[in-house]
Image (spheres, rainbow, N blue to C red):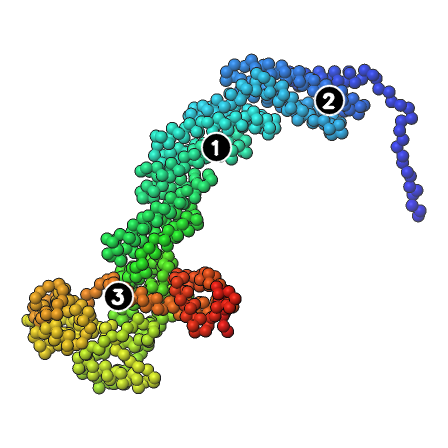
Amino acid sequence: MSAPKKRNFQIEAFKHRVVVDVKYAEKTWKIIEHAINEIYNHNASGLSFEELYRNAYNMVLNKFGEKLYSGLVSTMTSHLKEIAKLVEAAQGCLFLEELNRKWADHNKALQMIRDILMYMDRTFIPSTHKTPVHQLGLNLWRDNVIHSSKIQTRLQDTLLELLQEERTGEVINRGLMRNAIKMLIDLGPSVYQEDFEKPFLQVSADFYSVESQQFIESCDCGDYLKKAEKRLNEEIERVSHYLDAATEAKVTNVVEKEMIESHMHRLVHMENSGLVNMILDDKYDDLGRMYNLFRRVSNGLSLIRDVMTSHIREVGKQLVTDPEKLKDPIDFVQRLLDEKDKYDKVISKSFNSDKTFQNALNSSFEYFINLNSRSPEFISLFVDDKLRKGLKGVSEEDVEILLDKVMVLFRYLQEKDVFEKYYKQHLAKRLLSAKTVSDDAERSLIVKLKTECGYQFTSKLEGMFTDMKTSQDTMQGFYSAMGGEIADGPTLTVQVLTTGSWPTQSVGPCNLPAEILCVCEKFKTYYLGTHTGRRLTWQTNMGTADLKATFGNGQKHELNVSTYQMCILLLFNNADRLSYKDIEQATEIPASDLKRCLQSLACVKGKNVLRKEPMSKDIAEDDSFMFNDKFTSKFYKVKIGTVVAQKESEPEKHETRQRVEEDRKPQIEAAIVRIMKSRRVLDHNNIVAEVTKQLQSRFLPNPVVIKKRIESLIEREFLERDKTDRKLYRYLA
């Protein structure tokens, strides 16, 4: 079957020219004009919008678009001028109501007119680049009503007066305001800004300038900030109710400038109520309010931060330099922790945990803690006190919290190696006297120190714990091997300490009692027999002993004493009265230690198992001592501690400092060699900078010491000076 033939259709133009009646355009326009008048006169119900649309359509189609457009402009202008007269005639508060009513009417009319002239809006207006009908209606309203000479200023004044009334606490018709403002916004950004926003912002600035001055003269800082916050919130709320959203940033900026920025220095430093007083009085809400308000203005937070930093440094400086507060190291460190807690709370509760404030706090604490050269010693003493007795009955969680707080103070120390020296001494005493309250707490702190400073910092501390465990195993082996050989003698417990791990020191000879010396020799023989290549040295200054003593009336007690005290007391088994010289000659205990031991045994009330003649608090070389038969105690076990200064004496402090300086020398040299090995050639200043950077986690090396260590390395041919430039150093491979 063949496909049907395709036909081509062609639309041809009229063969005869269509002639339009010359009066057609005029007649049609009159119909449309009449309809526009009826719409403005609220008589639109009788109109046929379909017919009107067709008429407008035909006018555009027949090239009468220009006549239709110009007629529309003329008719609308005429009506709007009449409307303007009616609005002008409205009196008082009726003015704004009348304007809003006429605006609503105009918008309705404009909608109907646009529907009628839709075809013109879509075809004629784009092709001739004229203003669309709706926009044309707005422009004509603006030019003939809003910018009427008698309306423009009056409208602006009315709106600003209502705003002023609301600011002073009066209730206004917000709906009326909202409609009027929306009208200006609908007329275009420039109308809203020029006719309302600019004068509104100027009036606001004047208002808040005057009000803030009144407030600052009559209120304290806290009350002023509350009023400023209230005003700021009112303006934000006002914008949300009837102003353009874009105005919020501008009006809040005015409030911030006039109420905060202009007075922020006076507020922060206000007598009896400024920032420092708020901190001292724990006014967290007021501090939070100040932070939130000041963060809105330029340099606001930096001002708060600077004043807070200055205050913290001043308070801290007073704390660390006050001789009275330095008398008790435990109280001193507790004060530091309390101060840190106080400012941490301020920053978290009031300053939104702001990192810049936290950094300023850390910087301030680091500054004043290091003003006191004894801070490392005091922090170690604080830890020692807590781990000896201060943490009894405390939960593991609270122990961790306290240790974390101590670690924060430790981080502030520039001389961490000095802390390590003291901490090692205190830890040794705790371990050897079995006075640590919790092994878990001890190990937890060492883990924290290791995390903070690395393995090298804690390797010796961990070695101390290892020695304690190994010593237990050694003692079990010793008693198993000796069996009945030592059953009748004193019970001996030995801790074998690795030289280098423990803060041992060379001690003078101490004459141990014969029965003790016998057991010690047997242990020495056993230990050296099981470990080759080792040497044992007795640290008699670090030991303790339990003695059973019988006093008058057969009263018995068990005395816990130091090794030195044991040597003294056992002398009285064979003598009723001994002079200081006798005791010194028999025991050969160093004089300073001997005096402290005798002071503990004879001068401490409730622990005086010896009597001294003449009776006094201090020990003299011509004193005599007797066994105190009349000693009584309600406890069977009596611990007699050695009278020691809680803090180091000046000579001891000097000795510790010298040991620290000596320990630093190889560390500085090692850092120099590492740097030069990597860089090969470097000038003096860069070596100092690099060494300081490498070692600052442990201590801040003195540039003078670094220079001396460089000279030492040159002498030992690790480095040499460059032959062409004497300021440069070269590494010798």
**Residue at image coords 89%, 34%:** 10
- In the image, 646 versus 481, the foreground residue is 646
Residues at marks 1 and 2, CA–CA distance in whole angstroms: 45 Å
**Residue at image coords 36%, 46%:** 310
How crowded pointer 3 is (Cα within 10 Å; few <14, some 14-19, many 20+) is rated as: few
Q: Which residue is tagged 1?
A: 254
- Could you tell me if the residues under marks 3 and 2 are in contact, i.e. CB atoms within 8 Å? no
Image coordinates for residue 467, horizontal then vertical, percent:
33, 75
Do we see residue 379 in this rendering? no
Residues at marks 1 and 3, CA–CA distance in whole angstroms: 65 Å
- In the image, 449 versus 179, the foreground residue is 449
- Res 530 quadrant in image: bottom left
- In the image, 333 versus 77, the foreground residue is 333
- The residue most toward the left is 553
Q: Is residue 18 left or right of residue 123?
A: right
Q: Is residue 662 left or right of residue 722?
A: left
The correct choice, above or below, for 491 with respect to 275 in the image is below
Disc 3 or 2, which lies upstream in sequence? 2
- Helix, strand or loop at disc 3? helix
Residues at marks 3 and 2, CA–CA distance in whole angstroms: 106 Å
Image coordinates for residue 375, horizontal then vertical, percent:
31, 58
Mark 1 against mark 2, which lies toward the viewer? Answer: 1
Q: Which label is found at residue 69?
A: 2
Amino acid on which disc 2 is placed = Tyr
- Helix, strand or loop at disc 2? helix
Q: Which residue is tagged 3?
A: 652
Mark 1 against mark 3, which lies toward the viewer? Answer: 3
